[in-house]
Image (cartoon, rainbow, N blue to C red):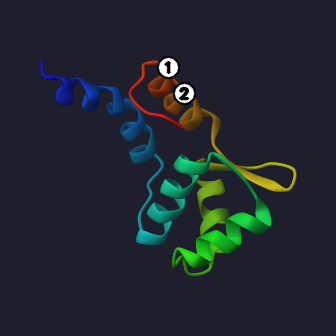
Amino acid sequence: MSSREMNFNYFRNLLKTLKNKEITNEDEKKVVLYFIKNISVGEILALRELEILGVKNPIKIIRSLILKGVLEKGEGCYNLAKDIREELFKLKHKGIIRI
């Protein structure tokens, strides 16, 4: 098995978790990628940065992703959901990604 195939296998669980969350439109994908890169972000900053990234109505998309279990609402912040964070941390621990 090549190193490229091995790296993809490590991502399989993360991709499966995200697929099960039924992320359907481009704005949802942008928001998920934003939170994969930034795991926990203050409410105001997240909304501003997502608007800059071209997300139309970021609060609506965030609420949708909270209901789907992709994001969580903290005190004054939004976080990537625990199960997705755990998959990311496993990848980090194995040295596959840096977050």
Above/below status of 16 relative to 91:
below
Which residue is denoted by mark 1 in the rendering? 93
Image quarter where the N terminus lies is top left
Residue occupying the far right of the picture: 75
Residue under the point 43% across and 19% down: 94
Answer left or right for 44 relative to 93: right
Above/below status of 88 relative to 73:
above
Q: Which mark is residue 78?
A: none
Is residue 43 in view from this perspective? yes
Find residue 16 and report its horizontal and vertical position in percent: 37, 38
Specify the amino acid type for callout 1: His
What count of labels does the image hold? 2
Q: Nearer the viewer, residue 71 or 91?
A: 91
Q: CA distance from mark 2 to mark 1?
A: 6 Å
Image quarter where the C terminus lies is top right
Which residue is denoted by mark 2 in the rendering? 89
Specify the amino acid type for callout 2: Phe
Secondary structure category for the residue under label 2: helix
Find residue 89 and report its horizontal and vertical position in percent: 54, 27
Secondary structure category for the residue under label 1: helix
Q: Nearer the viewer, residue 50 or 81?
A: 50
Find residue 24 and report its horizontal and vertical position in percent: 41, 64
